[in-house]
Structures are given as structure tokens and as C-alpha cells.
Amino acid sequence: MTTILVAGGASGIGAAAIRAFRLRGDDVLLADRNAEAAERLVGEELPGALRFLAVDFAEAGAASAAVTAAVELGHGTLDAVFYNAAVLAARPLAEWTAAEWDHSTAVNLRAPFLVCQAAAPYLVRAAQGRIVLTSSTGALRGHAGMPAYHATKAGLVGLVRSLADELGPQGVTVNAICPGWVDTPFNDAYWAHQPDPAAALAALTDSIPLRRQARSDELSGLLLFLLSPASGYLTGQALVVDGGYTAV
Ligand SMILES: NC(=O)c1ccc[n+]([C@@H]2O[C@H](COP(=O)([O-])OP(=O)(O)OC[C@H]3O[C@@H](n4cnc5c(N)ncnc54)[C@H](O)[C@@H]3O)[C@@H](O)[C@H]2O)c1
């Protein structure tokens, strides 16, 4: 039995991953700011347990609170961390404020660092300690109006490499997943920023070799693999799942 902390997973990619983890019997602590959606997940009858903690990862204390709750669920142990929360703000360069920049970096980059720091002492004692951070193909490409999103998602790849080096000797693997376009409301701010959202969506879909966005559950297979003994020699990597978007 494995205990997993999912940070940000009340909806979308994280919610699909939680279902997959619970289906194979993992116990999950979900830390998220969306209590309504999280409680619906808690109500699903699946083999693994799901406990919810309401937190806002923009606040510095949220990371240690989430790790403490996960360790309680694991009766003093924690096997894996999946940090998946993020915010996406889009506006013209001139309209960005320092406070808005700081909010994006707090949720997207500072909080995953703090969660990993708080979880590390437990992960090194686990049989197969695992960290997975959700980056994005936004780490590899940039779009106008979203400087904080792209900077933080690229920053996560650097964080993964540093932590892989530091925690590898103690048996903990650290990787990032880089989804391409996933059909969730997460991108609403991006679409709203486009002069013609319908035309932009059509052009995007046409540029993806598989000619569609991913469903939320199309990251779950990779996450099950990364949080399993089968991925024991894989660390320090940013794994792209994008329907071929960045290959062409
Ligand atoms: N949707 C895409 O196209 C796409 C592409 C690449 C990467 N991603 C990444 O995937 C991850 C999940 O995105 P998604 O598409 O499933 O969107 P989503 O909005 O369904 O999921 C994000 C989750 O994070 C939570 N969250 C956000 N800010 C939080 C905060 N401050 N404190 C606590 N919880 C917070 C939300 O409540 C939600 O449950 C994000 O890291 C996103 O950057 C998404």
C-alpha cells in the first residue's frame, strides 16, 4: 500500500490521476483550494482511501500542512508526491504587476519546492520514494501574455534536475511531466486572451499531429508508471505527452 500526496487535483489531470491511484489501491491525500470538487471525489467509492485538506498553495504554510496531513494518512510514512497545482494568468506585458507575478510564482514554483522540501525526509525512508511535478510543454515554448506561466513551468524542469541529483543517492526519483494541450477549463484565460478564440482553437488543433487536445485521463498511465517500481531507474527527466505538438 502506497501513500501519495496530490497537491492540486480536485479537477482535470489531477482528479483523473487520483482515480487511477485509488483504483490500484493507493491511499491519497488531496490538498487543493477547491473544496466543492474535492468533496465530490472523496464521495467516489474506490479501493484506495482519499482524504482532503483545503489549502491555498499561494500561502507559504500550505506546503508543510499538506505534507503533515499526508504523513498522518500514511501513519507516519509518505511514499510519493505529485505536485500538480498551477495558475494561468494571461494579459499584455504592460499590464502585469509585481503582485500578479508573485502569485503565479508562489503557486507554480515556490509551493512545489516547499512541498518537496517538507516531504523529502519521509520520501528517503520510503522503499521507492517518488516526486513528480507537473510542468508543461509551456516549459519548451512560449505564448504572448503568459510570461509567469512559461517561466514557472520552465523553472520546474530545473527544480526537478536539482532535486534528482540531491535525492538520487537516497533512492528518491524526481521527474516532471509536460502535458501539451489538455481539454480542461484551465486554459480559459489563454483562450480569452486570443483575438478570435474559435479560430485559434482550430489552428491549434490543426498543428497537433493527433489533431486533438488530450483528455484529462490521458496522463494517468504515465503517472501510474512514474509512481511505481517499474520506473525505478528514471529520474531527472521532463517527459512530454502532447500528441506530437512539440515534435513538428
Ligand atoms: N490543461 C492543459 O492544457 C495543461 C497543459 C500543460 C500543463 N498543464 C498543467 O496541468 C496541471 C493541472 O491542470 P488541469 O488542466 O488539470 O487544470 P485544473 O484547473 O483542472 O487543475 C488544477 C488544480 O489545481 C488546483 N489549484 C490551483 N491553484 C491552487 C492553489 N493556489 N492552491 C491549491 N490548489 C490550487 C485547482 O483547484 C485544481 O484542482 C497544471 O499544473 C497545469 O499547468 C495543463
Image (spheres, helix red, strand yellow):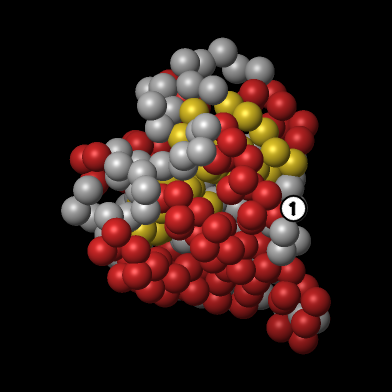
Horizontal and vertical percent position of residue 79: 41, 42
Q: Residue placed at 67% from the left, 68% from the top?
A: 106
**Given the current orientation, which residue lies at the most extreme top position?**
45
Q: In which quarter of the image is residue 61?
A: bottom right
Indicate the quadrant containing the N terminus: top left, top right, bottom left or bottom right.
top left
Q: Residue placed at 52% from the left, 63% from the top?
A: 117
Horizontal and vertical percent position of residue 11: 62, 38
Instruction: Judge by depth and name the residue closer to the eye, 115 or 36.
Output: 115
User: How many numbered marks does the figure carry?
Assistant: 1
Task: List the residue tagged with mark 1.
Answer: 56
Question: As displayed, is residue 73 above or below residue 181?
Answer: above
Q: Is residue 218 visible?
A: no
As drawn, is 247 to the left or to the right of 13?
left
- Mark 1 and ligand 1: say if the CB distance to the nearest ligand atom is below 8 Å: yes
Instruction: Judge by depth and name the residue closer to the eye, 41 or 13.
Output: 41
Indicate the quadrant containing the C terminus: top left, top right, bottom left or bottom right.
bottom left
As drawn, is 79 to the left or to the right of 184?
left
Q: Can residue 128 be seen in this view?
A: yes
Which element carries disc 1, helix, strand or loop?
loop
Instruction: Judge by depth and name the residue closer to the eye, 50 or 203.
Output: 50
Horizontal and vertical percent position of residue 235: 27, 59
Question: As displayed, is residue 203 above or below residue 104?
Answer: above
**Given the current orientation, which residue lies at the most extreme bottom position?**
94
Q: Which amino acid does label 1 sit on?
A: Asp
Q: How crowded is mark 1: few (under 14 residues within 10 Å), some or many (20 or more)?
A: some
Instruction: Judge by depth and name the residue closer to the eye, 163 or 103.
Output: 163
Horizontal and vertical percent position of residue 146: 63, 72
Q: Residue placed at 54% from the left, 23% from the top?
A: 49
As drawn, is 96 to the left or to the right of 174?
right
Question: As displayed, is residue 39 above or below residue 158?
Answer: above
Q: Residue placed at 41% from the left, 22% from the top?
A: 25
